[in-house]
Amino acid sequence: MSFKGFEPVYNKDSKLLILGSFPSVKSRKIDFYYGNPQNRFWKTVCGYFGEPVPDSTEGKKEFLLRRRIALWDIVTECEIEGSKDDSIQVISVADIPGLVAEAGIGLIALNGGKAYEIFTRSYGSCIGVPYVKLPSTSPANTRFFIKEWEDALQTLDGRA
């Protein structure tokens, strides 16, 4: 069965693009990114800026835009079993060059190995913007290191 992902969250002031692989079952159920409460994404990103995780989708979008963060998934449509990245097949890839050209993206952060693999295969040699592979925020990832995420987020607020 084929599933569609979400539209990107960004504006012309976005500086950091965070790319996941594809929404989980729990995310698809609430119709927004990182819907599994066990996923570390919102706690990590909001926590870096000393803010609580917003309760609503609109609050999360407002947070991202205020912090100049764009959010999307590298896969916009695919066949997938449950939430398993390893089962992703028959994919449509996001138009990352189009988003980069429209916004002021200066760094692309790839949330996990599958996002990195698909991104580099599709755009790695031609994107013209630096990119970095970050440890997946998924609760299934036992090797999550927050420091790598903090380093990427430093590009937004000059703490580097």
Image (cartoon, rainbow, N blue to C red):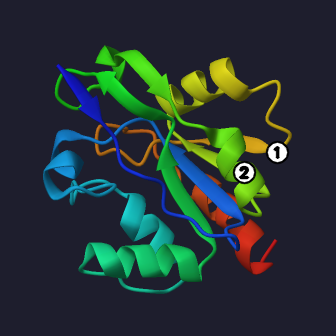
Residue 107 lies, with reference to residue 23, above or below; the image says below
Q: Are marks 2 and 1 in contact (CB under 8 Å)?
A: yes
Residue at the spot of label 1: 129
Amino acid found under the numbered disc labelled 1: Val
Amino acid found under the numbered disc labelled 2: Val
Task: Compare residues 21 and 127 and report the one nearer the observer.
Answer: 127
Residue 60 x, y percent position in the rendering: 38, 75
Task: Compare residues 37 and 27 and report the one nearer the observer.
Answer: 27
Q: Is residue 42 left or right of residue 140?
A: right
Q: Residue at x 41, y 49 (%)?
A: 137
Q: Nearer the viewer, mark 2 or mark 1?
A: 2
Q: Quadrant of residue 69?
A: bottom right
Residue at the spot of label 2: 100
Residue 86 x, y percent position in the rendering: 34, 18
| Secondary element at tag 1 | loop
Q: Quadrant of residue 147?
A: bottom right
